[in-house]
């Protein structure tokens, strides 16, 4: 798999929308955004950055571009989790799970479900 780059908060927000929509134009992205809507040029710039980072591709339809994901959301999720574990939990998934349990972000039932899913794999 190719090298995945970290996204900025703004890039990730737009990428989440592209993953949700599947295919979209810049105008359609802006339509889905909350008020106050950002300028078309700002959203277009971010989408071009996403394309440069190889997160999206495009095809031309008439006078506009339709953008679509070039990387699966699951691949970026995997990259993000590995980065989180590496940067904040000394590379240990056990440390991450321990943290989540201690912070009550993960119930024992959820922990057991995760264990069962891991056994299946």
Image (tube, rainbow, N blue to C red):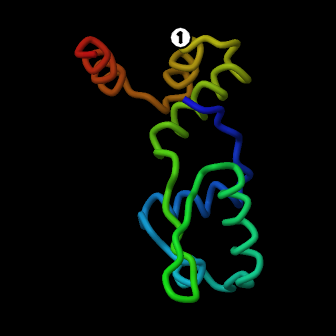
Give the residue drawn at x 66%, y 27%.
Answer: 83
* Image quarter (top left, top right, bottom left or bottom right) of the N terminus: top right
State the SS at label 1. Answer: helix
Task: Describe residue 73's horizontal placement relative to residue 90 as left or right.
Answer: left
Task: Describe residue 82's horizontal placement relative to residue 21 as left or right.
Answer: right
**Vertical order, 14 against 12 (above or below):** below
The answer to which quarter of the image holds residue 76 is top right
Residue 63 visible in the snapshot: yes
Task: Describe residue 1's horizontal placement relative to residue 87 as left or right.
Answer: left
Residue that numbered label 1 is attached to: 94
Q: Nearer the viewer, residue 20 or 113?
A: 20
Location of residue 89 in the rendering, given as x and y in whole percent from the top left corner: 67, 17
**Vertical order, 34 against 115 (above or below):** below
Q: Nearer the viewer, residue 8 or 25?
A: 25
The answer to which quarter of the image holds residue 5 is top right
Give the residue drawn at x 56%, y 28%.
Answer: 103
**Vertical order, 83 against 54 (above or below):** above
* Image quarter (top left, top right, bottom left or bottom right) of the C terminus: top left
């Amino acid at each position: 798999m190719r090298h995945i780059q970290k996204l900025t908060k703004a890039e990730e927000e737009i990428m989440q929308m592209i993953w949700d929509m599947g295919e979209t134009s810049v105008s359609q992205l802006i339509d889905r955004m909350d008020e106050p809507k950002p300028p078309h040029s700002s959203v277009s710039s971010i989408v071009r950055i996403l394309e440069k980072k190889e997160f999206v591709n495009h095809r031309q339809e008439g006078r506009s571009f339709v953008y679509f994901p070039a990387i699966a959301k699951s691949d970026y999720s995997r990259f993000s989790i590995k980065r989180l574990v590496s940067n904040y939990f000394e590379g240990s998934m056990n440390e991450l799970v321990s943290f989540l349990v201690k912070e009550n972000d993960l119930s024992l039932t959820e922990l057991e479900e995760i264990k069962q899913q891991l056994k299946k794999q």
